[in-house]
Image: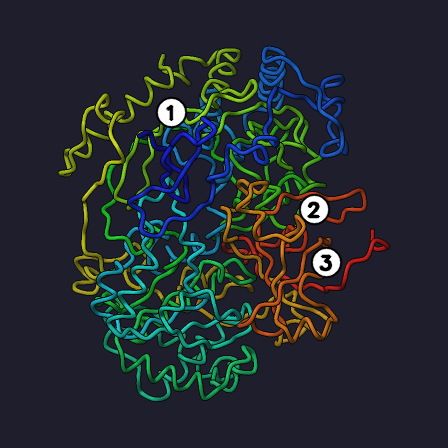
Amino acid sequence: MPYTSTHWGIREIVTGPDGKPRLRPYDADPDANDIGLDQLTEAVQSKRVLRPAVRESFLKDGAAAAGAGRGKERFVDVDWDTALDLAASEIARVRDMHGNGAIFGGSYGWSSAGRFHHAQSQVHRFLNSVGGYVAHRNTYSLGAAHVILPRVVMPMGALMNSHTDWDTLAEHCDLFVTFGGLPAKNAQVSAGGVARHRLGGALGRMADRGVRFVNIGPERDNIDAVTAARWIAVRPNTDTAFMLGLAHVLATEGLVDRDFLQSHCVGYDKFELYLLGKTDGIAKTPDWSASITGADPATIQTLARQMAGARVMLNMAWALQRAAHGEQPCWMLVALAAMLGQVGLPGGGFGIGYGAVNSIGSDGQRLPAPTLPQGVNPVSDFIPVARIADMLLDPGGPYDYDGTQRNYPDIRLIYWAGGNPFHHHQDLNRLRRAWQRPETIIVNECYWTATAQHADIVLPATIPLEREDIGYASLEHHMLWMSPAASVLGEARDDYDIFAALADRLGAEEAFTEGRTSRAWLEHLYDRSRKAMAEVGTMLPDFSEFRQSPPLHLDAKERKVLLEAFRNDPVAAPLATPSGRIEIFSEAIAALGLDDCPGHPCWLRPAEWPSEAGAKPGQLHLLSDQPAHRLHSQLDPGAASHRAKKDGIEQVRMSAADALQFGLVEGDTTILSNERGQCLASVHIQDGLMTGTAILSTGAWYAPNQDGLDQSGNPNVLTADIGTSKLAQGSTAQTCLIEIKRYSVSDT
């Protein structure tokens, strides 16, 4: 039986009753989902880009046509040679006139689960072969964490690979306290694919052993019911204030492990002055915390005492740091765990992202994966990934990032492949304005997404089901040969073949291809990985046998306890921080003098908030979470995605009390709006949602009408395009206030 891999699971390729290929979930997956089974249906395939296409005025006038036509003009189909010649000439023109520092290789996104046909790797390798490009740094998912955590404890990438494994938690943990839940819908995916979904089973084992769970946040049901979790409702964006209230109880009731703070941390004494109100006159008591979070002061006090008397794991969802001052909850979670003194103990300490993806909590070893080399980028310039609109709107403008002062490059050409910025960026109307500024935008795309519709040159790319590849995901215990399931639709080509043709026109074919076809690259990458894995004790079959094999199970396991070696001997196993220890106060950050990220974790009110309580009367705090029936915006036209919509519009979840206050009932079509934009959404009343909070999942394909009203329900027309702080410049999507009203035709 042939197989393929997707980020949400391995799929078996079978023949349906109609004789056509279809997909079904991997039989060995104990908790498989049905996302992506509809990839070959008419509803999805009808959205494909079938032929090379060029925006009409760009085809006529070239770069002189840059401007307001993007996203509005029709496209003209052209043959491949015309499209490739035009794309290559534009790259050459910009490179010769302005240098490679005027080319932005965006291509942020999950794209294919395959190791070779990974669009981001392909486009970056291509651009490096023709002289380089301006890159992005970090991710929308973890922009703040990627910058703050290396300064405080360890890099986020290393942390993700090192979380204490689920079996160890089941054996040793007594109390699991999570800020933002453990959403199973998020853990459906891992970058590169999933063979066996583990979250549900892991939580079941922990519950069977008697582990107690506490879920802190505005939503009750983003954790499996098997945990019987106690819900403590707190307002969005106030988790740091809640943690400070807990910390105050620990400090004032003698529940702090001062020996651990002395031996493994630096700066607690300075932080404690702030905690007790010695520096700002405000003691961070449970009463103070309650006034901000909406929680009960006695609940905060009781939980702090319970934490001090148990083996406790503290966890936070990634969403917490995608908010104004998103560095603070990361830093404060680590500080709180350090105060309890359980960092490095089995079942204790902290985690940042249990439940975020399937791989976190895995006992799998990180093995040498098949990876396409991207080459060396001669251009050193970069931007924080979420600052793309700032870059386009303010070329040469100054900005702060990670302790340095930088200037935005002057970008004349964007090349995008394998992603959809008109999904994942904030304030899409602002991005749309910024997107008019470059002279040329080239996109490799499978579907007519908003990104394709806002390009100048669109080159049709194959989907994973139309090509061979190698499926592998770090820590996921599997590797498989990805077989094609369907013939190529229209005139689509693999990204590799597109870039090889462009490289040939630009005199870089050998540098890009190294004389290899796609199949030759796959064999080369596999053989190199096979040899490297053998050196660490994992044996793989030869390439020809691998291609005929079912998914391989890589039984390379290890017991994991986060920071165990550091706990056992902080001198022999120091951290990579400036002090080698956990930095509760950072002298380096304090020396930067940033008003929005001082030298220790603290509560900072979001600038968008009119008061400490957040939204004012008539407003709701809008959260934008990962959807349950798709990965980000992938396959939004499919049946699985549409199950979560009503009449083709995304549903906004809200409490019954809020629906009553705004005069809304289940199924009403509404307009969500603020000063940045407006979108439609259908009302869904949800139990267990804190009043004043609404949730609209991300990923609906951006579809503004002529008046700018997004008709799909994309929350990013409402979110703010502002960095978390001058330190990290991460995304702040979760800090968003809106108004809501019933929609009528007169509103358009």
Say few, some or many: other residues with alpha carbon within 10 Å of mark 1 (under 14 / 14 to 19 / 20 or more). Answer: many
The amino acid at mark 1 is: Glu
Compare marks 2 and 3 and give the one earlier in the sequence.
2
Inter-mark Cα distance, 3 to 1: 43 Å
Inter-mark Cα distance, 2 to 3: 25 Å
Q: Residue furthest front?
A: 17
Residue placed most toward the observer, 413 or 447 = 447
Q: Are marks 3 and 1 in contact (CB under 8 Å)?
A: no
Inter-mark Cα distance, 2 to 1: 39 Å
The amino acid at mark 2 is: Arg
**Residue 102 appears in the picture as rendered:** no
Q: Are marks 2 and 3 in contact (CB under 8 Å)?
A: no
Residue at mark 3: 669
The amino acid at mark 3 is: Thr
Q: Which mark is residue 430?
A: 2
Find residue 613 and report its horizontal and vertical position in percent.
62, 76
Compare marks 2 and 1 and give the one earlier in the sequence.
2
Q: Which mark is residue 281?
A: none
Find residue 117 and report its horizontal and vertical position in percent.
42, 28
